[in-house]
Image: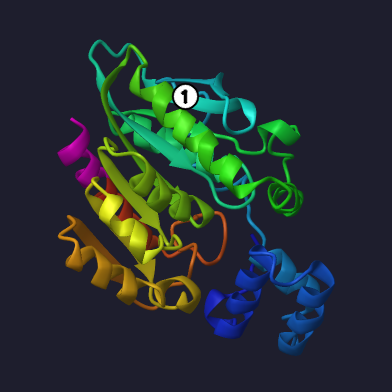
Amino acid sequence: MSQINKEDVKQEVFDLYDDYAHNRLDRREFVQKLSVYAVGALTVPALMSFLMPDYQGNVQIKADDPRLKSEYIKYDSPKGGGVIKGLLSEPKDNKKKLGGIIVVHENRGLNPYIEDVARRAALAGFITLAPDALTPLGGYPGNDDKGREMQSKRDPKEMEEDFIAAYEYLKINPDCNGKVGVVGFCFGGGIANRMAVRIPDLAAAVPFYGSQPAAEDVPKIQAPLMLQYASLDARITGGWPAYETALKANGKKYQAFIYENVNHGFHNDTTPRYDKVAAELAWKRTIDFFNEYLK
């Protein structure tokens, strides 16, 4: 990651990156708008380098960690993309049935950060499945920009079906105790909310900065929710008050946390939006929540 000091970068730069990362700006527009904030050492190339993810230096649990059994599998998604690839992980030499967690990626496919998160959750004592919604297009391409472009070409409803099919696959896995929850980030946070609406026996859902379901769908939610938001993420967090009103009106079980002075994506430790304190606290709460409902 670039040596730029995070404190020297204006919030507007992070907001621009958010627009770019969510396809509201193309690359040319992003660079053009970023040039306004290029002063001295903060050149446009330096800012671009600073903002982009660094997957090489920020893996917490390596793919070959000896404590885990972690492998790519394929499962059927007949209403979605057909055959979908996913990373299935669990503690090595496990002798008991474990709670299951579907780990849903952002809007760019199954990148190294999400695979790492899936391994972290497995190391905490769960069997996890992290699907790649880009499978029908060839899978995550190794580049987030290309991944976003690819994911934008997939039908959103079919992608939703891919993650519901992952839930069905994991629920009957012989190493799973039948209790399956979901954690998702960004696009995946929205999917986690949708899965709570769609799956009556979902055991728990933890959307990180995910778009909220329609108010008329809230009565369908049966799973307990833990909702993680960033205070500087006006685009997503702005929808929380109406969602909370609907959850309360329908007597739903939920916890919600808004982390102060952090951005959308604060859990992603490969970009400068990462906030170590907020990310670690949110993750501890997530694992504690899953320990409560999936064991």
Give the image quarter of residue 98. Answer: top left
Residue 216 in view, yes or no: yes
Residue 245: image location, x then y, percent: 25, 72
Q: Quadrant of the N terminus?
A: bottom right
Residue name at image x 31 percent, y 76 percent: 241
Q: Is residue 235 above or below residue 266?
A: below
Most frequent secondary structure within the magenta stretch: helix
* Magenta residue span: 287-295
Q: Is residue 202 above or below residue 128?
A: below
Residue 254 on image: x %, y %: 21, 57
Q: Amino acid at mark 1?
A: Leu
Say which quarter of the image contains residue 39: bottom right
The residue where tag 1 is placed is 88
Q: Residue at x 40, y 60 (%)?
A: 213
Residue placed at 23% from the left, 46% from the top?
222
Q: How is the image coloured?
A: rainbow
Residue 12 covered by magenta stretch? no
Q: What is the count of numbered marks?
A: 1
Check the image and report above or below for 173 versus 160. Answer: above
State the image coordinates of residue 265 (x, y, percent, origin top left): 49, 62
Closest to the observer, 114 or 123: 114
On the picture, is 213 further left or further right than 136?
A: left
Badge 1 density bin: few <14, some 14–19, many ≥20, Cα 10 Å: many
Residue 288 sits inside the magenta stretch: yes
In the rendered view, does 36 fall on the left or right side of 60?
A: right
Judging depth in this view, the residue of 284 and 163 nearest the camera is 163
